[in-house]
Each structure stands twice: as structure tokens, then as C-alpha cells.
Image (tube, rainbow, N blue to C red):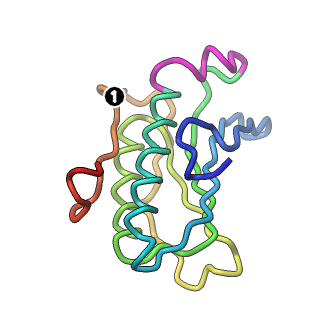
Amino acid sequence: MTVEEPKVIDISAFDKRKRHVYLAIADHLGWGEDEEEHHLLCLQAKINAYLYFIESGQLKEQLPDWAGFPITIKVVAKYVPRGEGTKFHKLVAKIVEDAGVTYELEVDRSKRRAAAALPSQRRPGRAKRPGRAHVTAPAGTPRGRR
């Protein structure tokens, strides 16, 4: 299970102490020039699938004991994002938070020299839930591949 498999929830966990649901994405892809476009498209598809899983009620249906608790989508990355990757994570954090879900990026400790800064996180609690959230491809991504 990895970021390249959009129809699979990589890791789901419930923190009993914090009373919080975590849906994690295992991101092993690099950020080199020849990898960036594929990486961004994979992340976009995976995050949209996670949002759909939450907003469509599938989380509540498949894991009813976790229903009603705050949710975090957490990307566990092997490499520090660069260039468009940094911009992408900042944009996604805002979109996901607007949907009432917290977004976190965790980079492998050995690769964390220049960790990507995300906007400050607000607690989702009982936040307003506007229409469905959707992550779109970043500027510069060829239209035919969105």
C-alpha cells in the first residue's frame, strides 16, 4: 500500500488517548525533476480518495466506532518536498482543513533537514462542513493528465 494506489487506505488508526482518527498515506516517492509530476498526481488522487472515503460516509460505515471523532489525513513521506511539492502540501492543508479534517506532513527523520512548513493547524472539532472538498492539480500540470 502506497501513494501510488489511490483506491487503498494505506493505514488507519485510532488514538484512544487523544480520541482521534488518523488516515495515513505512505509516500515513498522522490521529488526529482523527472519524478515531480508523477508524485503530485499520485498525491492528488490519493488525498481525493481519502476525502471521498470520509465525506461519502464510508469511514462511518466501515469503522462505526470511529464515527464522530476528529480526523487527520497524515502523509508520511520518505523525502522532504521541494519546489511544487512544498506548494502542493501548503495548498492541500488549507483545502483539507476547510473540509473539517486536519492535514499533517511527516518526513522521515533522516531526511528532515528542510522540513516543509504547513499552515498552522486548527482543530477540526465540529467545524462547518461546506460542500465536498477536492484537490486539483497544481499549475503547470498538463491538462490531459489532471
Coordinates of residue 54 in the picture (x, y in percent): 51, 28
Q: Please give the name of the residue rendered at 46% of the width and 62% of the height, measured from the top-left corner.
A: 39
Q: Quadrant of residue 118?
A: bottom left
Q: Is residue 61 magenta?
A: yes
The answer to whether residue 144 is above or below residue 59 is: below
Secondary structure mostly seen in magenta is: helix
- In the drawing, does residue 94 fall left or right of residue 121? left
- In the drawing, does residue 118 fall left or right of residue 142? right
Per the rendered image, the range of residues in magenta is 55-65
Residue nearest the observer in this picture, 123 or 77: 77
Residue at the limit of the structure toward the bottom, as seen here: 113
Q: Please give the name of the residue rendered at 46% of the width and 79% of the height, measured from the top-left corner.
A: 32
Q: Is residue 77 magenta?
A: no
Coordinates of residue 142 in the picture (x, y in percent): 23, 59
The answer to whether residue 80 is above or below residue 24 is: below
The answer to whether residue 23 is above or below residue 75 is: above
Residue that mark 1 sits on = 132
Residue at the limit of the structure toward the front, as seen here: 144
Q: Give amino acid for label 1.
A: Arg
Residue nearest the observer in this picture, 142 or 94: 142
- In the drawing, does residue 41 fall left or right of residue 27? left
Residue nearest the observer in this picture, 129 or 89: 89
Q: Please give the name of the residue rendered at 36% of the width and 77% of the height, measured from the top-left corner.
A: 83
Coordinates of residue 29 in the picture (x, y in percent): 56, 66
Coordinates of residue 138 in the picture (x, y in percent): 28, 59
Q: Secondary structure at mark 1?
A: loop
Q: Quadrant of residue 107?
A: bottom right
Total labels drawn: 1
Q: Please give the name of the residue rendered at 74% of the width and 35% of the height, measured from the top-left corner.
A: 14
The answer to whether residue 44 is above or below residue 138 is: above
Residue at the limit of the structure toward the right, as seen here: 16
Say few, some or many: other residues with alpha carbon within 10 Å of mark 1 (under 14 / 14 to 19 / 20 or more). some
